[in-house]
Image (cartoon, rainbow, N blue to C red):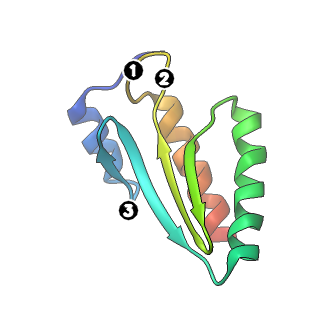
Amino acid sequence: MEKLTEQEIKTRLQQLPGWDYIEGAIVTSFDFGNFKEAFAVMTRIAFECEAQGHHPDWTNVYKSLTIRLNTHDVGGITENDFNLAHAIESIVQAD
């Protein structure tokens, strides 16, 4: 697993509207209609995370969900983070 450069990260982020590179992680937030909707999406994301063997740092407050992705093993961003980010976007958009 290879750590991506800052330029590679910025280039890849162009394909992920709503995601930013902040303090060594790619980060996004979502707002849902209520807590139940947020939790339902979090559950679907959790199954995808398990399938990929890659897990986010995330916080949920009522109907808001913030997700931070980085690869702790390499101390930065890898292709795994972008693969999971794209999967998360697909899950959220399908809802």
Do tag 3 and tag 1 residues touch (Cβ < 8 Å)?
no
Image coordinates of residue 4 in percent, x first then y, are: 33, 25
Look at the numbered discs 2 and 1 and tell me whether their residues touch, using CB distance below 8 Å.
Answer: yes
The mark nearer the N terminus, 3 or 2, is 3
Q: x, y percentage for residue 92?
A: 63, 66
| Three-letter code, disc 1 | Gly
Residue 17 badge = 3
Q: Is residue 4 above or below residue 55?
A: above
Q: Is mark 1 on a helix, strand or loop?
A: loop
Q: Determine whether, in the image, residue 15 is placed left or right of residue 44.
A: left
Element carrying mark 3:
loop
Residue bearing mark 2:
72
The three-letter amino acid code for the residue at tag 3 is Pro
Q: Residue furthest left?
A: 7
Query: Is residue 75 rendered to the left or right of residue 60?
Result: left
Q: Residue 75 carries which label?
A: 1
Q: In this view, does 6 lie to the left or right of 44?
A: left
Distance from label 3 to label 1 (Cα)? 24 Å
Task: Give the position of the C terminus as an image quadrant.
Answer: bottom right
Residue 52 lies in what quarter of the image? Answer: top right
